Image: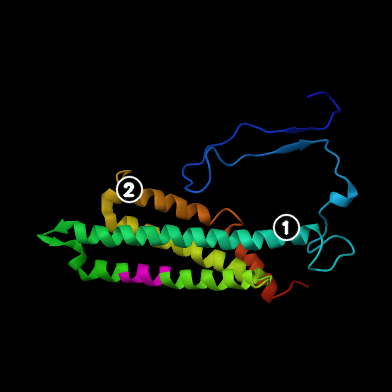
Amino acid sequence: MFQGRPSAVRPPARTASSIVCVPSPWPRHLELDRVRVPENDRLTGLYGDEGADADSGGFAAVQRGLNIARVHTAARAVGVARAALEDTWAYLQEREQFGHPIGEFQALRFALADMAAEVAQARAFWQQVAHLLDEGQPAESESAQVKLLTTEMAVRVTNQAMQLHGGNGYTTERRIERYWRDARLTTIFEGTSEIQRRIISDRMLPRA
């Protein structure tokens, strides 16, 4: 890189602990050094470029893309949680204690029932918001809500799945440990859970 010359620098990639749907190594970080951006290509303003309304402008387009990406993440979270539920369902019938499948113990049956109800609820909400986007509605608050609820649900369900698997769930012999890590990741990318709460609350209670 020559002094004073614009350039793009890509530092070494970091390897994530576990990502099912994203090629590893990930994520990558891009640094721009003295790169000039033409005025027409700048993204400015909170909801749009200067002189544009809330539904137009470069930054508004990015926001719309994020709404779609958050619903994608919600779908991924539901899928991870459902996989953990199905594996746990099978494990409770396979694993035996005191001469009986552990699925006969009421406490474990109730835990499985709670997991199933949470997954079904989140799946219905995700499909509802996806339909809103398909209809061309912005659904900004709804996208944040579904991303928040489904990803936090996935963390709870996979955590319970690991608990019901006992020590077996923590080993790589079972897929539960991977589901658990992947569920945790969904609460981070496309905006953390805290960011989703801020989006939702700002739409409900605009700042002065």
Q: Which residue is mark 1?
A: 62
Q: Hey, which quadrant is residue 146 in on the image?
A: bottom right
Q: Is residue 194 magenta?
A: no
Disc 1 residue type? Val
Q: Residue furthest left?
A: 99
Q: What residue is shown at x 28% (from left), y 55% (from top)? A: 165
Disc 2 residue type? Tyr
Q: Secondary structure at mark 2?
A: helix
Q: Position of residue 201 (x, y in %)?
A: 65, 71
Q: Which residue is mark 2?
A: 170
Q: What residue is shown at x 51% (from left), y 41% (from top)? A: 16
In the image: residue 25, left or right of residue 176: right
Chosen colour scheme: rainbow
Q: Alpha-carbon neighbours of circle 1 within 10 Å: few (<14), some, or many (≥20)?
A: few
Q: Which comes before the other along the chain, label 2 or label 1?
A: 1
Q: Position of residue 147 (x, y in %)?
A: 56, 64
Q: Residue furthest top?
A: 2
* Front residue of this view, candidates 163 and 7: 7
* Front residue of this view, candidates 73 and 14: 73
| Mark 2 to mark 1 CA distance (whole Å) | 39 Å
* Front residue of this view, candidates 67 and 169: 67
Which image quadrant: the C terminus?
Answer: bottom right
Q: Residue furthest bottom?
A: 204
The dot on residue 124 is: none
Q: What residue is shown at x 51% (from left), y 62% (from top)? A: 75
* Front residue of this view, candidates 162 and 38: 38
